[in-house]
Each structure stands twice: as C-alpha cells, then as structure tokens.
Amino acid sequence: MNVEPLETAEGAGFEGCRQLNVFLENRVGQLLRITRLFERQPIRILGLSVEGKVDCALLRMLVNDPDAAVELCGRANLAVSQSEILVVELPPGKRGIMTICAALISSEVNINYAYTVWATERNKPCLAIQVDSLISAVRVLHDRQFCLVAQHEL
C-alpha cells in the first residue's frame, strides 16, 4: 500500500497562527468570564468570534500566547482545543476583504469562517481565516503578494 505523507502549512514553509476554540454554556456572562480569566495575565485577545446555539457556544480566539492561554483555560476547567488559521493583512483601500476572497476563489479554496483582527506588530487590520486547504491558500496568497502573519508576529 502506497501512502503519501500529509501536507501541512508548516511543510509549505509557512508558520500559521494557532486559534483557541473554547466551548461554553450559552448563558449570560460567559464571555465576561473568559476576559476576566486573562485580565491578570500578559495574554492579549487579538480577535474573537462567538457562535451561539441554544445550549452551547463556541468562542474562537486569536491570542498572542496560545500556550499560556490553553494552560489557563485548562486550570479553569474550560474545554479548549486549538486549530490552525491564516492571518492575512488587509491591503490598503476599501476592497481588502474582497481581494483576499477573490484570490482564494481563484484557487478553489473555500473559506469556512473568518473574522477581523488587529493583530500585527505593525498595527495593521487583518483577516483571520480558516480554509479547507491551508497549502493552497498559502500558495495563492503568497503568489498574489498578500502579507501573511505568523504566530510570533502577533
């Protein structure tokens, strides 16, 4: 049986960003609970997205120190996982998001979800995106001269 190795964004020569996915009860005060958890720590929340359902909520967060944030969430008995996302600086002008989307669709890369962040050391607005093919997305965005942000640049 011939099995080919899996491709990863790291294998493509690019370090993506690690997003935290925190599972919460969908009730009043849960987002405040998370922000207070990080209040006394040097962990900055750079972007977030909340997806609420009737009984639970999924909080997706981009933070400057995902290792410390995961440890802190674990100590608080929160269910947390991590996933790899791409963070792309928005190009100048009012059509930044549109140009990123157009580049990705040209390579048939599907965006599963996205949210805006203000994440870089250069204080540029960015788009955090989770896509169905990290390798293809990295390639097309590099080819089109978009600036991808690595975890250590947050």
Image (cartoon, rainbow, N blue to C red):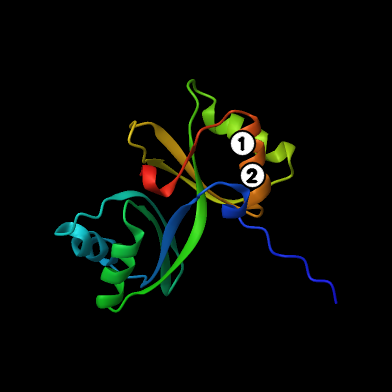
Mark 2 is surrounded, within 10 Å at the Cα level, by few (under 14), some (14 to 19) or many (20 or more) other residues, namely many
Q: Foreground residue, 113 or 62? A: 62
Residue 154 against residue 83 in the figure, above or below? above
Horizontal and vertical percent for residue 91?
50, 26
Q: Foreground residue, 112 or 134? A: 134
Amino acid carrying label 2: it is Ala
Location of residue 100 by image quarter: top right
Residue sitting at 54 percent across and 33 percent down?
97
Horizontal and vertical percent for residue 14?
55, 46
Among all residues in the image, which is located at the extreme left? 40
For the residues labelled 2 and 1, the Cα–Cα distance comes to: 6 Å
Residue sitting at 61 percent across and 35 percent down?
142
Among all residues in the image, which is located at the extreme top? 93
Q: Which residue is mark 2?
A: 137
Number of numbered discs visible in the structure rendering: 2
- Whether residue 110 is visible: no
Q: Foreground residue, 8 or 77? A: 8
Q: Which residue is mark 1?
A: 141
Horizontal and vertical percent for residue 122?
34, 31
Q: Quadrant of the C terminus?
A: top left
Dot 2 falls on a residue whose secondary structure is helix
Dot 1 falls on a residue whose secondary structure is helix
Residue 153 against residue 96 in the figure, above or below? below
Left or right: 148 as drawn, with respect to 133: left
- Whether residue 91 is visible: yes
Residue sitting at 63 percent across and 29 percent down?
144
Amino acid carrying label 1: it is Leu
Left or right: 121 as drawn, with respect to 10: left
Q: Are marks 2 and 1 in contact (CB under 8 Å)?
A: yes
